[in-house]
Structure formats: structure tokens, C-alpha cells
Amino acid sequence: MAFFKRTKKTHTNTALLHHNEQPKQKAEPSRLSDRLDQNLHKIREQTGHSRDIIIRTLSHMFGSEHTLAVIYIDGLVDTLTINHSIMESLTSRDYDEELYTSDPAEILSIIKNRFLTIGSISELEHMETLISAILEGNTIILIEGSSHGIIASSIGGEERGVEEPQSQTVVRGPKEGFTENIRTNTALIRRKIKSPNLWIVDRKIGRVTQTDVAVMYLNGIANDKIVQEILDRLDRIDTDSILESGYIEEFIQDTTFSPFPTITNTERPDAIAGAILEGKVAILVDGTPFALIAPITIFKLFQSSEDYYQKFDIATFLRLLRIISFVVSMLLPSLYIAISTFHQEMLPTTLLISLAAQREGIPFPAVVEALAMEITFEVLREAGVRMPRAMGSAISIVGALVLGQAAVQAGLVSAAMVIIVAFTAIASFVAPSVSIANSARLLRFGFMILAATLGLFGIMAGLLAMLIHLSGLRSFGLPYLTPFAPFIPLDQKDVLVRVPWWAMLTRPTLINRKNARRQKMNQRPSPSDGKE
């Protein structure tokens, strides 16, 4: 059996787009002209005479025949770099006599090697390369009489600084989060993993947006087959635009029609560093603070970075609490519907009488009552997210209190149902990963329908179907229920429980097939340590 499985529907959209298209010959790149005015005219023409394209010409600097042009896009460049490292270097020097007699190629070479005080400089000879370079924020230097130019790195502009992550906060641990700049994000990871084996493979995806995508992994630790499969799937993406990492996630995930994510995302550099050290692969996309991690298992979605920064006993307790909260958020309303509708004999007499008294006069069956309350809460939650930040929390809290109390007093829903829905909502916020919390939100409605039709038998049938589905899921060849199915005793140290750090001797087995040992044998401190 092949190591990697892909569903036939993964690239359906791409196949449909190209079904009736004939293969086209790739256009030859157009070379620059040795006439400066023609090059500048072509640049203005291809950019639509946009006013943010700045073209500064410097005449009679190297004799009457040699005119320079400095080209960049306002807002994409670092102004200090332009002013001091380029313009000042070109205009505030006393040029040697040889520059007035040299040919343009020699002048460009002297400018590149002697004048410009910028670290990254390269040459270009094609118009497509020139346009791509200035759109990335670089500065171009052209000279009359030469069909070559210089690319000077000046990428900058306004951007958000490194701040605390908004979606994955911790009490103890680093407070820095990713930004929208991909190079800032890769630097944050390199600060944590100072190893030459941390390799970055760059891709440009999106015919129009030309979005930078970086694949990061530890050479010698990451599985080479997984790395190559990720790169192959990225290379198969053929679309106009990539504006966020969610685009990449949908294109390369193993299964499209599943409520469970096979790729997770995070905006924490420490979470990415920890995943890379386990042998996983990180995918960073320019323009978003959310990076992707692959492959993953379902248990990874219940783990938080903070689990590894505090004692193993409290980390284990919180991890189990998250798993229980996930089950509660998914099944609690359906259990209430099933028991109150079909299995009243399971309740103690006192509780049964109390619930019956509350439901007296309620005009709707339990399933309609539960669906109405759940949909109402989802509307309130969405409204709280979309409202302005100053009003969002007030709308969600006050709306829930007012609507819940008014619905109970009006006799439309029972007080017990309000408690069930409220506790379900609170439990859904415990999961550290938003993607697994969203899975519980979707499955909750399906289980409610099953409970209303078949009672507890319907819930059990739904759980069995979900378990079968989870058993068949793969994340880049990795079974989704690893290390329980298949069962790997050595990997149980960091799944439901987290053992102390001195006991984590190896990395996950199926993810990492080489260099599996993480540390030396059992470095547990003894009572005699530190004594003379």
C-alpha cells in the first residue's frame, strides 16, 4: 500500500479548470533594453502608470552619456534604506575619473561592489524579474546603455510589531506571536532553534498574488517522505490568489469532507518550534500570523504550549479536562434530549419530578427547544465576534442573559435547558485549538438529531460512525488516532498524560523514523544531587 493516500476529490477544482484547456507554451521572458527610456516606459506601462511607482533619474553623474534610474514602490520599501544606503551612496561621492570613461556594465559593477551599502544585492536582465522585484519591495537601479540592472534589497514599509497572540494565550510561557511578515516569523523560529539543520524551502503560490510560502523543518529529524509530499502538494496548487494560510490548508489537506482538521494552525512561535523538534513540518504564509503544522493527530489538538512549561501533574490534569470538555460540548445537549424524551427511567425520581415540573407548559419538544437555544447562542457568539470590540462582549453577555431569562419567564424554554446550553458553550471554549472546537460545534447538531430520533441508541450509533471515520483519517500518511490506533506503548508518554521531561526520551515514532532519541537515558534528579 502506498505510504501516502489522497482522496480523488482533493484537486477536483484544479482538474475541472484545466479539463478543456490545451497546454500552452510558456512565454519567453523579455530581456531589458539597453535604452533606459524604453525600460522606464515599459515599467510604467505594465504597472498602469500607478503613482506609487517612484522613478528617480540621476543625470550627468558619470558623464553625459550615463543616466541612472532608481525605481521602487512607495510604501513597500524602508525609507531609511532608500535615503541613506542607496540615494546618499550614489549622490554624495566624488567619483573617480575612470567612471566617466567606463562602459555601463563596468559602472554597474563598481556601483554594486563599491558604492551600495546594502547587504543583499543581485543583478537582473529580464523585465519580469524587475517587476517581481519591485512588487516585493526591492529597489531597482538601471543605467543608460546597459541591458542589465541591479536589485537592492530594501523591503520594509509599515507593519505590525511582535505582540502577544490573541487566540492562544498562556499564563506561563513566551508572550510573542507571529506577525503578517513572513521573514519576521521565520526569524522568531530561528531564535528558538539555533541549528543549521533548520531548513527553509520557499515557494511562490498564486498567479496574481505571488504569495511567499515557507516550509520549515529540521533536516535529519523530519521524515523526508512527509516533507516531499508537502512540497509536491504545494507545487500542485494552481490558483490566482493565496491571501491566508487557510487557502493552503484546504488545498493540501488529506480529506475535504470531514469535520476534523488534519492540519492545525497556531500563531505561537514556541508551538511551531516544539512541533519542528518533534519532526513535524511548519508552513508559513506571508500576510498572516497563523502558521500551519503537519502532520498531526487528534490528540495534538488538545495540547497547549503551556503543558510543557509547568509541572507534569497539573499539565496532565488540564489535558484530561480539555478532552472531557470536548466530549461535554459535543454530547451534553443530545444526552439531555435522549434522556428526557426516551429514557426518563435513568433519572432519580426527585430529579425527574423537578425536570417534569420545569417542562410543564413548554409548548415545544426537547429537541426543538435545544435546537432553538443552540442556534440562538451561535447567533450571539457570531454577533459578539463581528461587533466592534468595545461592544462585542457586552452584546454577547447581556444578550444571553436577557434572552435566556425572558425565554424562561415566557414559558418557551425550561430553566434546565438554559443551564445545559450555557455549560455546553463554556465547555466549547476550553479547547486550545479553535479548529477542534468548531468540530464539536458541527457534530453537536448531528448528535441532537440522532438523540431525538433514536435516543441513546442513536447517540451510540453516531459515536461508532465517528470512531470509524477517525480510524480512516490520515494526515500526510500518519494515522489520525496515533498512538492508540495503531497502539504504540512507547508514545503514550505525551498523549492523555504528560510524563516528566526527564522521561521523554524519544520523539513520536511514526512521525520520526530517524534520530528518534531526544535526550540521554533517564536524567531524573536524585536526592543526592547538589550535595557535597
Image (spheres, helix red, strand yellow):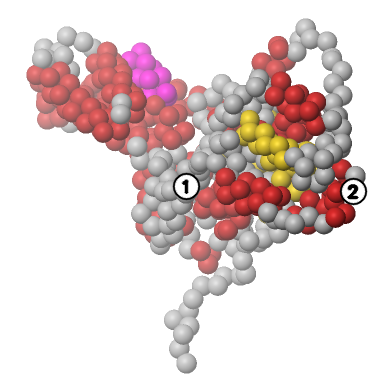
Residue labelled with disc 2: 102
Farthest-out residue, top: 20
The amino acid pointed to by label 2 is: Ser
In the image, residue 282 sits, relative to residue 47, either above or below, namely below
Q: Nearer the viewer, residue 347 or 525?
A: 525
Residue at the image point whose x is 64% and y is 27% from the top:
209
The quadrant where residue 51 appears: top right
Whether residue 398 appears in this view of the structure is yes
Which residues, given as a range, are shown in magenta?
442-454
Residue 223 in sight here: no
Q: Is residue 501 magenta?
A: no
How many residues crowd mark 1 within 10 Å: few (<14), some (14–19), many (20+)?
few
Determine the secondary structure under disc 2: loop
**Which amino acid type corresponds to the residue marked 1 in the rendered image?**
Gly
Magenta span main SS: helix
Q: Residue at x 35, y 20 (%)?
A: 448
Q: Is residue 63 above or below residue 450?
A: below
Residue 521 image offset from top left, x and y in percent: 61, 70
Residue 446 included in the magenta stretch of the image: yes
Residue at image position (84%, 14%) is 23
Which residue corresponds to the image point at 70% horizontal and 11% vertical from the top-left? 16
Q: Residues within 10 Å of mark 2 (few under 14, many from 20)?
A: some
Rendering coords of residue 478 (x, y %): 64, 39
Q: Position of residue 293 (x, y in %)?
A: 58, 41
Which residue bears the numbered disc 1? 161
